[in-house]
Amino acid sequence: MIHRRSVVVAAVGAALAVALPTAFAGSAADPGISSTAIVIGGTSPLTGPAASYASVARGANAYFAFVNARGGVNERKIDYRIVDDAYNPAQTVQAVRRLVEQDRVFVVFNTLGTESNLAVRDYLNQVKVPQLFVASGATTWGRDAAKYPWTIGFQPSYAAEGLVYGQYIARTKKKAKVAVLFQNDDYGKDLLASLKAGLGRSGSKVVAAEAYQVTSSDVGSQVAKLKASGANVFCIFATPTFAIQSYVFANRLGWKPLVINNAVSGTSNIMVLASEGGKNKLVEGTITTTVLKDPTDPRWNKDPGMKQYRVLLAKYAKGANPNDVYHVYGMAVGYETVSLLRRLGANPTRVALMTRARSIASPKNPFLLPGVVVKTGKGDSFPIQQGQLQRWKKGRFVPVGGLWTSKRN
Amino acid sequence: MTPREQRIFGFAVFAAFVVFVFVLPQFISDFRARDYAYVGIYLIALLGLNILTGYTGQISLGHGAFMAIGGYTTAILMAGNEQFGGPVPSGMQDIWTLPIAGLVAGLFGLAFGLPALRLSGLYLALATFAVAVAMPSTVKRFEEYTGGGEGIQLFGLPELTGSNAVAPADPNAPATFELLGLTFTQNDWMYYLAWSIALGAFAGAWLILRGRTGRAFRAVRDSETAAVSSGVSLARYKTLAFGISAAYAGVAGGLFAIASAFVNPDTFPVALSIFLLVGIVVGGLGGLSGLVVGAIFVAFLPLWAQGQDLGSLLPDSVIQGDTVSIPILGDFLFKGTSAPGGPAIVYGIVLILLMFVLPNGVGGLFRRIGQVITNRRYSRSK
């Protein structure tokens, strides 16, 4: 026994001898930081039911390539590793572990999907790896910042978005009967609950709500049931594939409600697809909200940010469709990440990154609508809390009213 | 070789393999250990499936569903389902849930074996496939037991062995914990757990198949009529094969849940059932040793395929920037890892090539090598 204990003592001693000098020097770089590179990684649905969102990662990747071509961030190139998780949280868990333990990324960046991010949040907070700018609007990212200090969101919360839709209906329609299609997870439920809160006691109310599963093949039966409720407002709280299906099925059933489509699929490229080459009139008049400059909107033809967007996409993501607004989202989040990394200076650490991420003040992101501010601070862990209601009219979005700002989350 | 010599040779190879398995973590990175733990888990499932399909001749396209039953049994026993409104309290340590996972899945397998008696060949394949297809929806239907589509989070639970691991001062080193006087990283622990069970399962499968039961299974496979006329009860042995096979899958599913520290309905997709069948075909139907290679194939080929730069295989003329244009198939944006659709194509091509080169799987190759050695010995002794 003595022998064994002495071996342990010797081993501990040796370990300390190795560990102490670095501890005192304080210069042991965090994983993912080398003299020439910052390795970051994230998962994206490159395949599967939400594969349209792959453009987000592609847009961010193009922005990083642009920054790298101009010398990188504080003389380090950004090495962005994108792993496919097929929008399946079980695969996200394995992919994120791979990024953290094998690729040794500095941060897990912009992983997409509410469920996917929930599945890895406990893990990332335990191993103290930043879960930076989560690509999901679930309210929990900002609300539970104290419990999960290593996680921060990006886009407006679904709770704020749903509230805005509810208030819009209450303001513009008397005694509306609202039917809701929602994804059966935190994302869909957040939107539904806040929509109801927004309707308040206006006399308009939700008369039917149907859930669908991410893994289901179509939402035909849900749409039929919603139509049968006799509603005159149809809220689509669904990802692009299912949102397009909703328009198609509702149109085939001869249902003509006012459609409210959530921001994650209320984009010009999706609207064009849903209009079936102009045959589907239901698309006309759709209400949605956004924070991004729409690449198909001629208002931004001379906008420096959008000009840069087109140049960068053409140069660093050859073959990518510039009208796909998810690329704009990718660049917007890429822009914030680069400015955050810049502010960390020559010796970036994960701790410093999270501290800085909780004190962002970025009023001029060139890819976001003018006036939209990316801001966090004490007690405010929601980077974007504004948006613009817009209506789809003759093949493009037109703004409805001014920017809205959410007061409560 | 005489049968006795053959058996001694087999034992020697198995012993060498056991030693190899237990020293391997010394030579690979901590993260790789977790990858290889998944190989062990798949091996358990493949062993079970081969008892059913390779030895008894009953095709199952639904083994992912039996893994799901095992996985959910483990997850529910560990985390409890009171949080969803179910009746099961949390609190069972992960490894103790595994025998129960095997038992529950095995009972489901026995129950499924009964209707399966009336089906054979393609019809059985379809019926089992239906089980795999229905499983995710069934799991979601009983939300109060299973947590529905959102799944059950096991990460950080005290019931998960090693969740109390302490991170060392060096941010690059993995966290470690003590168990039975030994120090493990979480990944190494998972590796040893999965492989201890896998090797036990391997020995178990060998014991089942070498004697009377195994003979009966093979008789059912080769000719049901002949088997019946020799006094083999079809009903008994077919349901038994289903039960044993499902129990193996259940244990594998339980381990899978522990290794991923998370289960949801998509953890066990329809594709998993198909991959398992691919695994035993690659490993060799009706053999055990080749299944190790089959398991490596199932665990690593999809990952490997993701890492293959399809673009680099093609002449520069078809690559413009990061886009690869392939006639008919269309454009593949991004090079390498993120080429959508690329990994699936690589996977398919490798599988087709493999079946051309090794029509009887890796097990067939092993047997052929064995025959060469045997022939040489016979010709020498002449």
Image (cartoon, coloured by chain):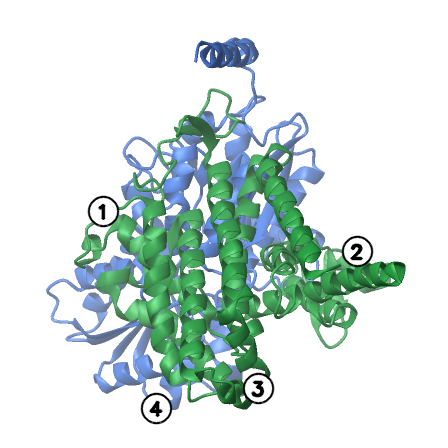
Chain colours: A blue, B green
Q: In this view, does B92 lie to the left or right of A262?
A: left
Q: Residue A408 carries which label?
A: 1
Q: Which of marks 1 and 4 is nearer the N terminus?
A: 4
Name the residue type under label 2: Ser
Q: Position of residue A370 (x, y in %)?
A: 45, 49
User: Toward the viewer: A332 or A128?
Assistant: A128
Query: Badge 3 is on which residue?
Result: B223
Chain of the residue under label 1: A
Name the residue type under label 4: Gly
> Does mark 3 fall on the same chain as mark 4?
no
> Does mark 1 fall on the same chain as mark 3?
no
Q: Where is residue A155 in the image (x, y as percent from the top left)?
A: 40, 50
Name the residue type under label 3: Ser
What residue is shown at x 65% (from left), y 43% (from top)? B16
Q: Which mark is residue A254?
A: 4
Mark 4 surroundings within 10 Å by alpha-carbon count, few (fewer than 14), some (14 through 19), many (20 or more): few
Query: Badge 2 is on which residue?
Result: B312
